[in-house]
Image (cartoon, helix red, strand yellow):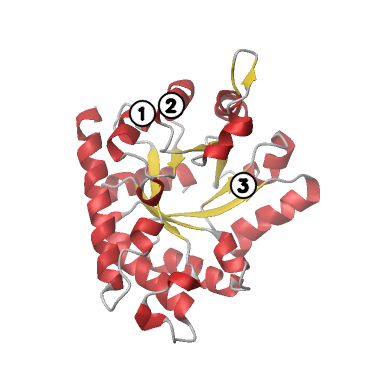
Amino acid sequence: MTFHQKLNAAWQEQDSLLMVGIDPDLDRMPTPLKHEGDQLWHFCRGIIDATAPYVCGFKPQIAYFASIGAESVLQTVCDYIREHYPKLALVLDAKRGDIGSTAEHYAREVFERYQADAVTISPYMGMDSALPYLARRDKGVIVLCRTSNAGGADLQSLEVAGRPLYLHVADMVANKWNEHGQCGLVVGATFEKELEAVRRCVGDDLPLLVPGIGAQGGDIGKTCLAGCNSQGSGMMINSSRAILYAGSQDDWAQKAAEAAKQTRDAINAARAPLKA
């Protein structure tokens, strides 16, 4: 099964466009876990189990693990998701971008060591930097396009030949890199007009990974109106902090589940009128 097939199945079977970002911050661990030696793993597993009924997938962010030398925990997290929730998409948020043998090693890390279904990458160094990922035709390659941070406009919104650079990226990925139907784009919920422009540019079939709701302030209704395809689907709407840290006491996992359910339900309510 390819990444896109798995993602489409998850959208339908879970009735959810919500993706939970696994960004564990040791400074924000729930109080009951703070004195446990394996608090990072217990937290990640608790979040995964609590939110799995409400999501289409999970997006671990590699930096949160690598910065504290916890790559082994990340590997355990990825193994756990694949074993216990095999129908959910596993996207490793790495934002890699290099060329040649270095890019090949990054691709091996993502797809062989962590066995993720998809990875986020930067387009800045061109197609040869994407080729080692694209060579795995069953895997997803999700390219940074118009990111949710304000500073993204420094380059992404530059006018090039009459249109912003992010639309050149969207067009390039959709029409040149996506030969085997494995690509997606990262477009932030914090910029609805740009999200709408990207959807118009790439059509219905390219999935969009959309960060920026929740703690970053993106509006769910406007996001769905701008980014959904003609079937009222087509997005992985990511939320991290608003779900991960919804609670800090003994009921932290329950609070995360409640936040995930509320977010899923809000997304479904917003996209219901858009379904064909």
- Residue 265 or residue 217, whichever sits in front: 217
Indicate the quadrant containing the C terminus: top left, top right, bottom left or bottom right.
Answer: top left
What residue is drawn where x is 77% and y is 52%? 102
Q: Which residue is mark 3?
A: 136
Compare marks 1 and 2 and give the one earlier in the sequence: 2
137 or 214: which is nearer to us?
Answer: 214
Question: Residue at coordinates 44% horizontally, 37% vertically from top-left?
Answer: 207
Q: Based on the displayed image, in which of its 4 quarters is residue 237 positioned? A: top left
Q: Residues within 10 Å of mark 3 (few under 14, many from 20)?
A: some
What secondary structure is found at the residue carrying circle 2?
helix
Q: How far from the left and from the top, in percent, is residue 87?
A: 37, 56
- Cα distance between the residues tagged 1 and 2: 7 Å
For marks 3 and 2 on the same chain, the one whose residue lies earlier in the sequence: 3
Query: How far apart are labels 3 and 1 at the CA level?
Result: 30 Å
Name the N-terminal-most of marks 3 and 1.
3
Q: Nearer the viewer, mark 3 or mark 1?
A: 1
In the image, what residue type sits under mark 2?
Arg
Which tag is nearer the camera, tag 1 or tag 2? 1
From the image, state whether disc 3 or disc 2 is nearer to you: 2
Mark 3 and mark 1 residues within 8 Å of each other at the beta carbon:
no
**Residue type marked 1:** Ala
What is the number of the mark on residue 199?
Answer: 2
Say if 57 sits above or below 219 in the image: below
Could you tell me how far apart the alpha carbons at marks 3 and 2 are, in whole angstroms?
Answer: 25 Å
Q: Residues within 10 Å of mark 2 (few under 14, many from 20)?
A: many
**Label 3 secondary element:** loop
Q: Quadrant of residue 179?
A: top right
For label 1, the residue is 226
